[in-house]
Amino acid sequence: MKKIFSAVWDYFRRLDKFMLLICLVLSAFSVFLLYTLNVNEISAFVTDRQWKTQFAASCVGAVAALVISAVDYRFMVKLWWLYAPVSLILVGLLFTPLGVGVDGADDIGWLNLGFIQFQPSEMLKIAFIMTFSLHLSKVGDKLNDIWNVILLAVHGLVPVGIIMLQGDDGSALVFLFMFLGMLFAAGISWKYMLAAGICIPAAAFVAWNYVMQPHQLKRFQVLFDEEMQQSEILGIYYQQWLGKKALGSGQLTGLGIFGSDKYTYVSEIDTDFIFAYIGMTLGFIGCIATIIILAALCLKALSNATASKDSLGRYICVGVFSMYLFHSVINIGMVLAVFPVIGIPLPFISAGGTSVVCMYVAAGLAMSVHSYRKKKTHMFYEEKYD
């Protein structure tokens, strides 16, 4: 019995309590927002199902994070042969009749198995972080050998291509950002970065003129053309126009969390545009507080990377950091109309069971790196064990 208590005490002593606390605060905030969305009847599409599902998913995710944090990340990565093929198979099933879309989405991103409906691309993000981290750690000092760079590029760009074929451009960009962030952390040579930078204009030209669909082009053009914004105010710009009005209506302190039904319809206000609801109800102060908490989440993942005892743990944390950062910046940018609408949820806050659980799983990986580290010095402080 004494050994059991000792093991439990050691687990909680090493547990990354700060990261867990941040995740729980964001989840509690999300459930509260979704509950008030239902009570205020902001949208006919928001019912009590959203906040109940979010609460259940947050509970499942928190338990998963606690379990994962107790397992050595080096052991979990060795199981890549199990979870990587399963994730790819589930994504592949999206190209069958089992793949479904939802109202307001351009992609077929949900897998309907009858008893459950979820987004396999979210699971693939976790699998990619772990497999690409393993690949980078195996390459080691030979990272910049040309064949290793080619193989790493194939590893990184294959999921990007698969998700693009599925039609989920937002998730494809998340994979691309994680790929670049982890490569940078591994020490990719500036020569390759320079070569990639030179190729970007040509790739952008080809994508703009031959790859992107007319509605995708409009989403970019409308951000910089005021005349087009006026002509598309009831068209492709309608969602962002209403979102900006809702966001700005809160001014400094917001209209209040209850009874704020001034804007009765902002499309996807419970998911992609929930930041607009935060601005409307809690104002500028609420928006800044949300951004500070999300920034703390990102920095904590980065701090865990600096404290990792090996390169594998560092790459895992950088991958988690890159995912959280990209989701946060792009989602808020969509609401502010500085980025096009590409369907990126706000971490832990936007409604979505699969997304929330996978965000917690990612946090669990970063927490595992924290638990099994040897270094005591973090980015911002030094922790001492007894």
Image (cartoon, rainbow, N blue to C red):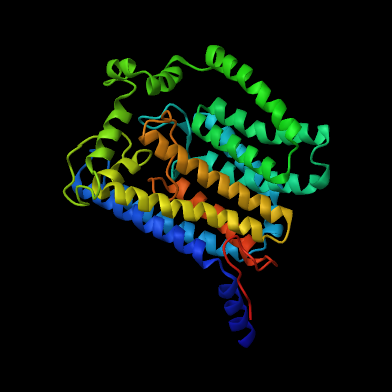
Q: Residue at x 37, y 31 (%)?
A: 337
Q: Residue at x 63, y 46 (%)?
A: 129
Q: How many marks?
A: 0
The image quadrant where one finds the C terminus is bottom right
Q: Position of residue 244 (x, y in %)?
A: 29, 34
Instruction: Kindly give the residue lying farthest to the top in the view shown.
Output: 209
Q: Is residue 183 left or right of residue 261?
A: right
The image quadrant where one finds the N terminus is bottom right
Q: Quadrant of residue 159?
A: top right
From the viewer's perspective, is residue 266 above or below residue 49? Answer: above
Residue 278 shows up from this direction: yes
Residue 78 shows up from this direction: no
Return the residue nearer the eye: 28 or 182.
Answer: 182
Q: Is residue 335 left or right of residue 282?
A: right
Q: Position of residue 111 (x, y in %)?
A: 49, 37
Q: Position of residue 102 (x, y in %)?
A: 39, 32
